[in-house]
Amino acid sequence: MCYIKSMGKEHEQKKDVHPKNTLAFALLVIAMISWFQSTPVIASETPPQPIPIFLYHHIRNVKERWSVSPSLFEEEVKYLFDYGYHSVAMDAYENAVQNHTELPKKPVVLTFDDGYEDMYTHALPILQKYGMVGTFYIITGFVGTNGFLTWDQLSEMQKAGMEIGGHTVHHVFLANLPMNMAKEEIEKCKSELEKHLGNKITSFAYPFNDHNKTVEKLVEQAGYTNAVIVDIHYGDDPTNPYSIPRITVGTGESMALFARGAEKGYAGINPSVQN
Ligand SMILES: [Zn+2]
């Protein structure tokens, strides 16, 4: 922004050059152009590049909206790897946003909701093959039940560098619940994860994307430092750490759309959002 402003200022100065000094004026313009071309734009003066945060559910060979086949998932992860992206977990992302800690070049966040068993059988090996990490949001009341991850699998995933986040105890619509019940769903999920996994849980995802200011406050008060949503809806503030938008990746996504999401972040595939 400052780059453009300073160019405008120089342009105003050019008007003051006396017409008789045409040659000197031309030389001045050439010198100015070459100066601008050789002067790198200072990073802090450029608008921040939105960091893409992708959302997956199942990684499996089932034809339904929320399932991405392992082969397509591998194609997407390989794309990120080949194009020099570096995955970070949500806690690292939020730490960088809040505390200005450094992120690797071309950061990308891969998130996975619900804690299905195929996270362990399909997602994990592909992520590991390309040296990527992900954030997995777990419904603690479903852990170890049919089709969901077990505590041992979660522990193994965490040891492999994956981040485990909260997604309530029973996958409920939080905004519809009486406040004390919503509070319990949010807090108990965190304490159960911490008890079984032995480390602090800081990231949260709202089941069904159901959230409002009260729910966001409960998540903050429970000690989570960030919470992700599925999309930007009326009333959401994209700079709020408790309503961070994600790009949903579904069945049969084109690689062109995926690549655009990776390059531009959330705004790249949602034209209604500025920047
Ligand atoms: Zn969910």
Image (tube, grey):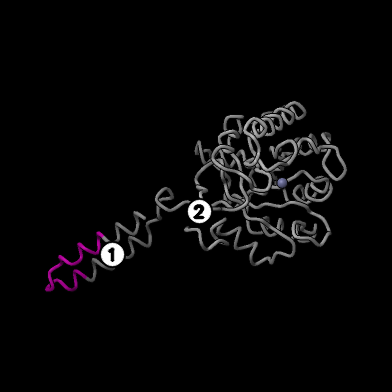
Residue drawn at point x = 84 percent, y = 59 percent: 61
Would residue 3 appear left or right of 72 to someone viewing this image? Answer: left
Q: Which residues are magenta?
A: 9-25
Q: Main secondary structure of the magenta part?
A: helix
User: x, y (%) of residue 212?
Assistant: 57, 42
Q: Nearer the viewer, residue 203 or 39?
A: 203
Q: From the image, tell me which residue sits under label 2.
A: 49
Q: x and y percent of residue 209 in the render?
A: 64, 48
Residue 102, percent across and down? Answer: 54, 41
Residue at mark 1: C-beta within 8 A of ligand 1: no
| CA neighbours of label 1 inside 10 A, class few (<14), some (14 to 19), many (20+) | few
At horizontal 63% and vertical 46% (from top left) the residue drawn is 210
Mark 1: amino acid: Ala
Q: Name the one closer to the observer, 93 or 81.
A: 93
Q: Is residue 130 magenta?
A: no
Label 2 residue SS: loop
Residue at the image position 74 percent from the left and 29 percent from the top: 192
> Which one is in front, 208 or 82?
208
Asked whether the beta carbons under mark 2 and mark 1 sit within 8 Å of each other, the answer is no
Residue to which mark 1 is pinned: 31
